[in-house]
Image (cartoon, helix red, strand yellow):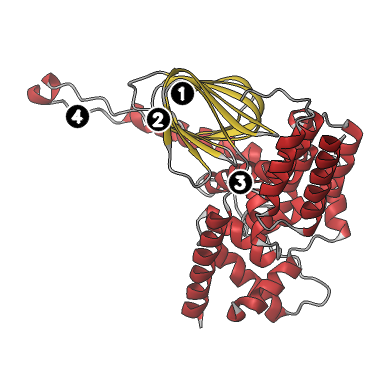
Amino acid sequence: MTAQLPGVRSNADTLSAALDDAVPTVARWCARLGGPWVDPEDAAQDVLSTAVARLDSLRDPAMLEPWLFGITRRVLAAHRRRVWWRRWVPGVSVDRIDLAPGPDQDAIALQRATQLQTWLEALPDAQREVVVLCALEERTHEEAAALLELPLGTVKSRIRLGMNRLKALAGEHE
Amino acid sequence: MSDLDPHLRDLREATEPDDARLRRIREPRPARSAGWVVMPLGLAAVAAVGLFAATQVPPDEPSPAMAAAPTPPLPPTPEPIDQALEGTRQLGPWVRTTANGTGTASGTPTQLALDWSAGTLEVEVTPDQGVALTVATEEARVRVTGTVFTVTRGPLGTEVAVKRGSVDVQCGDAPARPLVDGSRTCLPVTPVGWLRRASALQQAGRHAEVIEAARRGRVLDPKPAVARELARQQAAAEAALKR
């Protein structure tokens, strides 16, 4: 069945506005998926500049969030590689990016957040993404499956494996 | 999950962007940090030291046996591939893609994974070069070793069409089946996918198929907003058929 049905052409203004609304979401993804060494603001800027440059390629406005997540994933991978290389180059220092404490956060809370951030680094990328979306961002499995464009069963198995690994790491720490 | 709940809550709060951070992200990008100036300089310094050492130390005289035996060349390290698919791309020596839509390629020249989100992707793979290539969409997974084919992801689902050779097509969780000639469409696997299909069919006036798409989307336990829209599409199609 070859179907060339009339596609929904995106309105540039509407898309730009939707992209602006998505800035907090992208900022969260970069901070939660980038790990302790990637500068989340720098990565988020890269994601948004890439998205703006490629906005014409987004055919279905309803797919904005999965499309942005795909860009975020690639940008973060590039930033991680860049940080990894910089650690081996003489004359270049790589510092851990400190988490910005919220107004009500105390030192213990910040320590717990940093611990979890470190444990998340021990997960494979695929499990880390699902754990961040479902456990941290409290999205449903169905929402995560739609965002990642994965079968629901795959998301469920990844969250199970990821959470088990995190619990094991937490157990080792205690 | 209870042991991790405090950690999750604290990381959630610590990574919640405040207004100042959002403002900085939205601002025009400042010049890159000096680290990127230092890095090439550092690399150049390492290379210069290496070159100097190589020119100062006289090489050992090779034994006749060593001189006679040519050193076997090391196999080249494959360049990793990680890029967006746009226009015509050569992904290594044996794979060529022509993209009109959105997707990415990752892997190596002989182990390629293409993620395709929307539009049409034509893939040409040189046969018998040991290239393992997979194209994945929400509805379909296509595995190929040597062929020319297209993958079109649109509102109706994912259509795989083989021009030359053969591919294995796996629709959703169904077993993979070979596709030697012609085309196959993998139907949506999510309620949102069925809603997209129903909307496209509605625009095309294919009302009977709209009812079927809406029905199949609703049995997948959609979220309330999606369920409402599917029901609305179905009712509109039923009304159109009665007229």
The residue mark sitting in front, 4 or 3, is 3
The residue mark sitting in front, 3 or 1, is 3
Tell whether A41 sits left or right of B176: right
Q: Residue furthest top?
A: B164
Q: Which residue is mark 4?
A: B60
Seen at 66% across and 57% down, the residue is A142
Q: Which residue is mark 3?
A: B189
Tell whether A157 sits left or right of B236: left
Q: CA distance from mark 4 to mark 3?
A: 66 Å
Q: Earlier in the sequence, mark 3 or mark 1?
A: 1
Q: Which residue is mark 1?
A: B92
- Return the x and y of residue A15 as percentages of the image width and height: 85, 37
Q: CA distance from mark 1 to mark 4?
A: 39 Å
Residues tagged 1 and 2 counted as in contact (Cβ below 8 A): yes
**Corner quadrant of residue B131:** top left
Identify the subunit bearing mark 2: B
Seen in the picture, residue A151 relative to B17 is either above or below; the reply is above
Q: CA distance from mark 3 to mark 1?
A: 32 Å
Q: Which residue is mark 2?
A: B110
Kind of residue at disc 1 = Gly
**Corner quadrant of residue B16:** bottom right
- Return the x and y of residue A39 as percentages of the image width and height: 69, 52
Q: Earlier in the sequence, mark 2 or mark 3?
A: 2
Q: Secondary structure at mark 2?
A: loop
Q: Residue furthest bottom?
A: A174
